[in-house]
Image (spheres, rainbow, N blue to C red):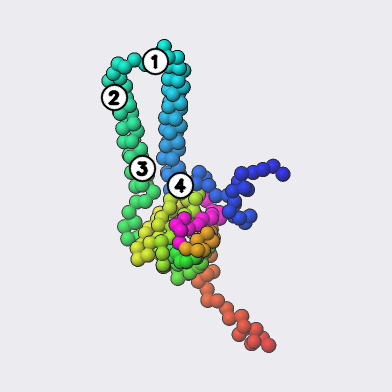
Amino acid sequence: MPFVWGNFLKVSPDIPFQSVLHSSSQQAEEINRVTNYFFIDSGFILLVVIVLTAYVLYKFSDKKNQPSAKPLSRKWEVAMIGIPGLLVAVFLYLNIKTINLVEPPHKNEIPEVIVTAHQWWWEASYPSSNVVTANEIHLPAGKKILIKLMSADVIHDWWIPQFGNKMDMVPTQENYLWLNIKQPGEYYGTCSEYCGEQHAHMRLKVVAQNEIDYHNWLAQHQQTAMNTSSTSGAQL
């Protein structure tokens, strides 16, 4: 059987490999776009440093070719200061632009779901339908939704790698996160802020559904649970 890194890096046999580089939301696409620019820029700088270092080592390896003590050219000084300064300004602009796209103001909008982190489980409540679930959160795909994040005890952190953005969940504080899942599917995450002895087991599953399946799921979970014991007694 061939070795597959994705299988080796799974957190468990039942959970597929999760990667921040696999964008499953519009927010993750925006974040990864800036990340890719940074990787390209860093790789180019590394290549320039390696080439210049190799050139200097080769050219001045002989004692006869030692560099002179004359001052450095002004052009080189301008380039060494100006180019890094320009790159910092460009990435500052890209970061501010991405933040505005990923986390615009919520303007007191009603969230689709309120997620409350506990030691060591997740509670999800749906304000529009009075549905409450634990550890498995259902969300609509292909729609921009607002999620309200809270903590019932200590600091936790919402993170699903394929959704990109992370958000702290702080006691007594309400944080909000925008999310637009591209397609239906199952996505897995975890609490990424150490929160106690069972932190490693604080897993999270998000089930993204199309609009029809999502509303059917909400309607189904709004129904009053049947008392099976009393029904069985009546039949006897």
Q: Please identify, in this view, whether the residue under mark 2 or under mark 3 is nearer the observer.
A: 2
* Label 1 – label 3 distance at C-alpha: 44 Å
* Label 2 – label 4 distance at C-alpha: 37 Å
Q: Please identify, in this view, whether the residue under mark 4 or under mark 1 is nearer the observer.
A: 1
Residue occupied by mark 3: 95
* Dot 3 or dot 4, earlier in sequence: 4
Q: Quadrant of the C terminus?
A: bottom right
Q: Residue at x 45, y 52 (%)?
A: 180
Residue type beneath disc 4: Ala
Dot 3 crowding, Cα within 10 Å, few <14, some 14–19, many 20+: some
Residue type beneath disc 3: Asn
* Label 2 – label 3 distance at C-alpha: 25 Å
Q: Position of residue 24 (x, y in %)?
A: 50, 48
Whether label 1 touches label 3, CB < 8 Å: no
Q: Residue 162, relative to residue 151: is it above or below?
A: above
Q: Please identify, in this view, whether the residue under mark 3 or under mark 4 is nearer the observer.
A: 3
Horizontal side of residue 117 vs 68, given as left or right: right
Q: Position of residue 134 (x, y in %)?
A: 51, 67
Residue occupied by mark 1: 66
* Dot 4 or dot 1, earlier in sequence: 4
Dot 2 crowding, Cα within 10 Å, few <14, some 14–19, many 20+: few
* Dot 1 or dot 3, earlier in sequence: 1
In this picture, which residue range is highlighted in magenta? 181-195
Q: Which mark is residue 129?
A: none
Residue occupied by mark 4: 28
* Dot 2 or dot 4, earlier in sequence: 4
Q: Is residue 70 magenta?
A: no
* Dot 2 or dot 1, earlier in sequence: 1
Q: Is residue 194 magenta?
A: yes
Q: Residue at x 34, y 51 (%)?
A: 104
Residue type beneath disc 1: Gln
